[in-house]
Image (cartoon, rainbow, N blue to C red):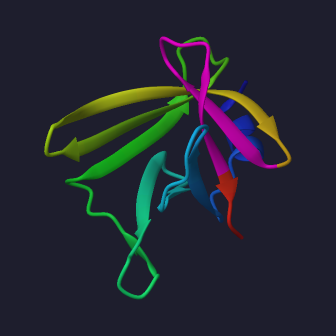
């Protein structure tokens, strides 16, 4: 895979709903052309989607060292801990991106385009 192939797989004009395989969330993300990931959350107040401050959640995406896989590297902060998590693209089906954790074969999240 080449760097240009990333943009044939990932659409930087769309916001994706982050859906764990086994439950629903109110989390969203958008890929930027510079390799950054911006995170969003749906508010309970008026059901609008707002950006999550980068001190709580941020990320980037890139090709692995063998240029075979798209990798998401995410940072999250939580009262019970936090840190960096790495996820690897394992499938794309009708614009839905499916990722697995780095050390697992099981698919864990789906990114479903909203627009």
Residue 50 forms part of the magenta stretch: no
Q: Which residues are magenta?
A: 95-111
Please tell me in which quadrant of the rendered image residue 14 appears.
bottom right
Decide if residue 12 is on the left or right side of residue 46.
right
Above or below 100: residue 45: below
Q: Is residue 66 above or below residue 15?
A: above
In this image, 88 relative to 103: left or right? right
Quarter of the image for residue 42 reads bottom left
Assign the C terminus to one quadrant of the image.
bottom right
How many discs mark residues in the rendered view? Answer: 0
Residue 98, how many percent across, how many down?
A: 67, 35
Nearest the viewer among 2 and 91 is: 91
The secondary structure making up most of the magenta span is: strand
Name of the residue lying farthest toward the front: 23
Left of 99 or right of it: where is 37? left
Work out which quarter of the rendered image holds the N terminus and state it.
Answer: top right
Q: Residue at x 13, y 45 (%)?
A: 79
Residue nearest the observer in this picture, 93 or 22: 22
Residue 109 lies in magenta, yes or no?
yes
Residue most toward the right? 94
Residue 78, image x, y percentages: 20, 45
Q: Residue at x 75, y 30 (%)?
A: 91
Tell me where residue 97 appears, x and y as whole percent. 70, 41
User: Which x, y percent locates residue 7?
Assistant: 70, 46
Task: Note whether 89 is above or below 4 in the view shown.
Answer: above
């Amino acid at each position: 895979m080449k760097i240009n192939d990333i943009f044939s797989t990932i659409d930087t004009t769309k916001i994706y709903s982050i859906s764990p395989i086994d439950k629903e969330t109110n989390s969203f993300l958008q890929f930027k052309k510079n390799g950054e990931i911006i995170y969003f959350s749906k508010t309970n107040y008026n059901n609008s989607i707002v950006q999550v401050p980068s001190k709580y959640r941020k990320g980037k995406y890139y090709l692995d060292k063998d240029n075979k896989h798209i990798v998401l590297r995410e940072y999250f902060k939580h009262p019970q801990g936090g840190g960096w998590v790495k996820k690897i693209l394992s499938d794309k089906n009708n614009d839905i991106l499916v990722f697995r954790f780095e050390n697992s074969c099981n698919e864990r999240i789906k990114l479903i385009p909203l627009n």
